[in-house]
Amino acid sequence: MANTYKNAMFDLTTTNKTTVYTCPATTTALIKTVQVTNIDTGNIEVEMFATDASNSDAEHELAHVSLSSKTVDNLAKGTIVLEAGDVLKLQAATANKIAGIISILEIDF
């Protein structure tokens, strides 16, 4: 069993739900932080979703924030556990104004 610390950087270039991380096969991922930055001058709504691969790809909303101008927030208020095939997605109300980084610990079996 190997533990690998990773990060996944993202830039939300559309207003569609965007996959920012997919947990690899034979892996459990611990998401420690999902840091989002509003690089715009106005408030922007940001949402975070998880898709559960073991439950017919059921999607659940994990966070919804209104991010003020030029501010940073962590959408993960606690550790998020993803199993193999689970997907983390983000959606912003305005394109090209939200960027960030995800801190991940991947545990391989």
Image (cartoon, rainbow, N blue to C red):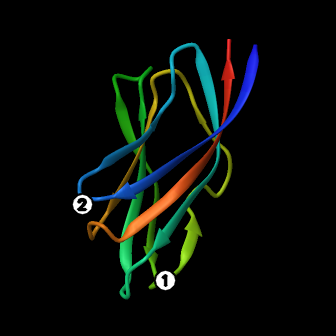
Asked if residue 28 lies left or right of residue 42, the reply is right
Give the residue at mark 2: 15
Q: Which mark is residue 34?
A: none
Residue 19 percent across, percent down from the top left: 36, 42
**57 w.r.t. 61: above or below:** above
Residue at 44% over, 75% down: 38
Characterize the local packing of mark 1: few (<14), some (14-19) or many (20 or more) Cα atoms within 10 angstroms: some
Q: Which numbered disc, 2 or 1, marks the residue closer to the eye?
A: 1
How far apart in space, not on screen, are marks 2 and 1 (Cα)?
A: 19 Å
Q: Amino acid at mark 2?
A: Thr
Give the residue at mark 1: 70
Residue at 24% over, 60% down: 15
Residue 30 percent across, percent down from the top left: 66, 36
Residue 64 percent across, percent down from the top left: 44, 64
Element at label 2: loop
* Disc 2 to disc 1: CB gap under 8 Å: no
Asked if residue 86 lies left or right of residue 32, the reply is left
**36 w.r.t. 20: above or below:** below
Residue 74 percent across, percent down from the top left: 60, 63
